[in-house]
Amino acid sequence: MFRKQRKVKRYHNIYRGSVTSSPFFKLGASAAALAVLIAAGWFLYEPVYQFVMGIGQEKEPVSTAEQPSEPESESDGFLSGLFGGGEESETESSQSQPEAVEAVQLHGVYMPESILLDSTQRSQFIQACASNGINAIFFDLKNDKGYLTYQSSLSQAAELGSQSASAVDLSQVTAEMEAAGITPIGRIYAFKDPLAASAKLEAAVHYQGTEWAWLDNSAAMGGKAWLNPVNEYAQSYISDLAAEAVGKGVKQVILDCVQFPSGYSLEMADYGQELTEENKSAVLGDFIESVDTRVREAGGETAVYLSAPTLLSSSSGQYGSDPFQLTRCGVVLGVMPASFGNAYSSGELVLEAPALDPYATVQAALAACKDKLLSDEVTVLLQSYTSGTLSSLKNKTYTGEDVDSQIRAAQESGYESYLLYSPDGNYSIVFGE
């Protein structure tokens, strides 16, 4: 703001006569005039500076208005909150942080292949989810048989013949979800892949001392081959699939069956080198971190699926010496009551009838795991269906109240993000339809 400048009054009659003609007077007058100019410049500097800076400040609202609107920034909140900071200033980061934290809370459901591969059913499913407050959908990118549900351009997919005949355009699917405000999450079955293991024998677990593929049961009983977790080709194939999926719009990749094989005759399984239980944990942990690095570089996030019954079991040798070592990156933690069977007992958790009291089961399972999980990025997997395998005395028909009780138990335990699982994609007990 300008300061009103004082006028300098000049009285011409004071300096008339011989005094003004004196050279000393002229020299003094010049010096005085110079001093006046310097003083005027000094007092004028601040107002002029403020005026110039004020002009620049008036333009700020124009540039601010050109920034993305708040709803658009929220669509990126999942990335910025879950994946870490971007190239924003400290002030902008602190101001946007609360929105980012809120945006990462996932309330999702599982969409089975039967719906994914049918464009009409898929569209209806997505809209039903959006209408009922669901903000994430997870679906299979590579199923437990080894088939890809989406159209892949990877050379390994062509070599292995792993692309399903009805594979979808993944970019189109993720765009449909994003348009409805849904975060696309893709699941990849890692080393449980009988198709790839049979097509690429050198990447498979071998039957000890032979070139044959090891099977998790007899061939007559439907035994399946597994990919070798130590094999470079097997690891690269899974890593490449994850990175490709993110490039097609998937925001998070869930790695399932990151493990050494389970089944019969495990003592005959040959991995090409001697492995201790500690070695197995290291192999799997390093693999998860390598995939996570690839996925982050592509702009996504990685989580590994592990169930609480497996983590807490003393017989989880397929994960090495300590399965909790695999939780260094993001985790999807399975605590579905039916997954504990008719009864469950470990050193830290005893459940007499897990499915009958879903609230208590989820609460107790999370309490048993919480202090051992190495990552803070945890999403819980909850049950949204009635089990068909449990004893009638240890089972009940699940309702919306049973689902709500599990969600409440998770939230009270400090876990806000959850995924609901129904194998056939029927969530009528949740949506009230």
Image: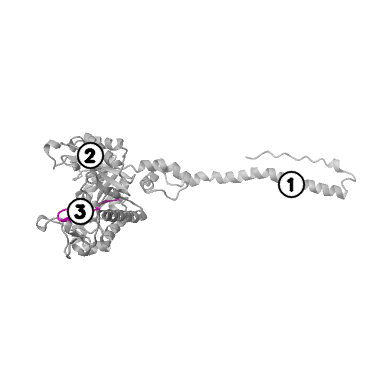
Pair 2/1: label in front = 2
Give the residue number, with chain letter if any, for mark 1.
37
Which numbered disc, 2 or 3, marks the residue closer to the eye? 2
Q: Residue furthest bottom?
A: 211
> Is 349 on the left or on the right of 85, as rendered?
left
Q: Is residue 195 visible?
A: yes
Q: Which residue is mark 2?
A: 349
Q: Mark 1: few, some, or many residues within 10 Å (few <14, many ≥20)?
A: few
Where is residue 209? Give x, y as percent. Answer: 17, 64
For this view, does 147 lie left or right of residue 301? left
**Residue lying farthest to the right in this orientation:** 18
- Coordinates of residue 252 in the picture (x, y in percent): 31, 50
Of mark 2 and mark 1, the one earlier in the sequence is 1
Q: Is residue 433 visible?
A: no
At horizontal 24% and vertical 58% (from top left) the residue drawn is 275
Horizontal side of 373 relative to 399 (left or right) equals right
**Looking at the rendering, in which quadrant would you find the N terminus?**
top right
User: Which is nearer the N-term, disc 2 or disc 3?
Assistant: 3
Q: Please name the residue that numbered disc 3 is placed on.
A: 144
Residue 413: say if magenta.
Answer: no
The three-letter code of the residue at mark 3 reads: Asp
> Which quarter of the figure has residue 151?
bottom left
